[in-house]
Amino acid sequence: MTKKVRVRFAPSPTGGLHLGGVRTVLFNYLFAKQNGGDFILRIEDTDQTRFVPGAEEYIFNTLKWCGLEPDESPLHGGSYAPYRQSERKASYRQYAEQLVKDGYAYYAFDTPADLDEMRIKFKTAENPSPQYNQQIREQMRNSITLDAAEVTKLLADDVPHVVRIKMPLNETVSFTDMIRGEVSFHTSQVDDKVLLKADGMPTYHLAVVVDDYQMKISHAFRGEEWLPSAPVHLLLWKYLGWEADMPQWAHLPLILKPDGNGKLSKRDGDRLGFPVFAMDWTDPKTNETTIGFKEKGFLPEAFVNLLAMLGWNDGTDREIFSLAELVEKFSMERVHKSGAKFDYEKAKWYNHEWIKQSTANTLLSAVKPIFKEKGIDVGNDALLEKVIELVKDRCTLLPNFVQQGSFFFQAPFTVDVDTLKPKWDEKKNMFFTELIRAYELSSIWETHDLEREFKELASVNQLKPGDLMLPFRIMLVGGKFGPGVFDIAALIGKEATVARIQHTLSLL
């Protein structure tokens, strides 16, 4: 019987969600939906010292904005609740104790001072930062080196202790990664990781294995930075007798800096002036806000599309995919082994493509609040829709709609008369004075009629229409930009068109 596909994303609520985290969510989500499975969000809050207020809510809001909502989570509920590790605390100790009883783990009573002393005592030029491993554990204060009676007394006296995995000597641990194929580790290179902390909370290593087992996770996708932890997890699945239920693993490639030199970080985004978080994140400790893709003006469809292409393709040159198309096309076989460079200019290209192919009606709800924020009254939605349709091909980010469209709703604050002055003469002045009169007498105010009237008047005045179009544009919008000039005049209406021509003539 085929195991039902169940995948999970398990973030720690320690801050904003980096785009690498959202890509992990996306690949989990695509795989689950493609296989008729479930996508679970589990909050890994075992390290209470790093807990940040508001971070969990931020994670949910981010996934909602991206359209990647989980089937089960602390918010959505589910058959395997609770979905916060801090609420599952009681269930972890029994497994840690079982590992000690079976000889696969041990109690370690070393104090922080003991550990500091160990790092100094065993430090060498070849080993500048000694780890608590197979050799060093024999020199430390734990249930391997102490006699059984002393261990029993220490436990009875509630002496603070941790539980560590007992890594075997000289063994090779292997598994088949869905992206990388066969991966092997030598146990002598892995230290005895802490499984249960002194406060009774599990570390990631124990909790992830227990939770994946109890929640019947079939596939575990995570970033390649977790690859060094794989031998610990493989052994825990084996030692707890759950090897047959172990999920298939895939370690996703890193998202790299634009120059390809190392993993992309928040610091790189700050330095280079682009977002690396999905949405704005305000650090409650410093009150500093990091700008997100949403606030920068990205559509969620574009953000999801660009994330999918960081380390994956469908085998063709195609780059634009909707979420439904990604669900259909995605395959783990086509995820790259090597890291993917993040290119912000390419990210903006995706957004531009999505804006161009979106209908004005679809864009309305995202664009209208931006005009409102700038204090621009857009009147009715029908007019704003027409404006969106006219300017959307010129907009890369959503705030560009204000730059490209504000003059439809208010006269420009400045008019670039310096561009007009060098070639301005009495003939052009006369033309626009007559155009005011002609337009004031027009009974029909449509694009085609306005253009015909303009060109006929230019012909009468023996002027080239091409020499008059730029001045007309600058009069209406204030500068050398915007859609078709007669489309602009038709939309802003007779009164505004005439007033803007008169205003520029007075400046000239």
Image (spheres, rainbow, N blue to C red):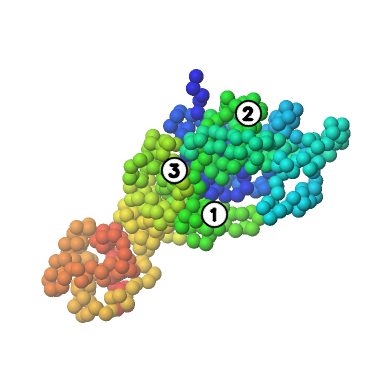
Viewed as shown, does residue 504 lie left or right of 340? Answer: left
| Crowdedness near tag 3: few (<14), some (14–19) or many (≥20) residues, C-alpha within 10 Å | some
Q: Are marks 2 and 1 in contact (CB under 8 Å)?
A: no
Viewed as shown, does residue 60 lie left or right of 361? Answer: right
Task: Find numbered disc 2 in the image and state the secondary structure of the residue it sits on.
Answer: helix
Counting labels gives 3
Q: Is residue 270 above or below residue 320?
A: below
Q: Is residue 384 above or below residue 37?
A: below
Tell me where residue 124 appears, x and y as whole percent. 71, 53
Q: Nearer the viewer, residue 301 or 139?
A: 139
Going by the numbered disc 3, the residue's amino acid type is His
Q: Nearer the viewer, residue 74 or 100?
A: 100
Task: Find numbered disc 1 in the image and state the secondary structure of the residue it sits on.
Answer: loop
Going by the numbered disc 2, the residue's amino acid type is Lys
Tell me where residue 280 appears, x and y as whole percent. 53, 53
Asked where in the image residue 462 lies, by quadrant, the reply is bottom left
Number of the front mark, 3 or 1? 3
- Residue 91 visible in rendering: yes
Residue carrying label 1: 265
Q: Which mark is residue 336?
A: 3
**Which residue is depicted at the point 36% across and 56% down?**
395
**Which residue is depicted at the point 42% across and 53% down?**
347
Going by the numbered disc 1, the residue's amino acid type is Ser
> As drawn, which residue projects farthest toward the top?
1
Q: Which mark is residue 216?
A: none
Q: Is residue 50 above or below residue 273?
A: above
Among the two numbered marks 3 and 2 on one chain, the one whose residue lies closer to the N terminus: 2
Q: CA distance from mark 2 to mark 1?
A: 35 Å
Residue carrying label 2: 238
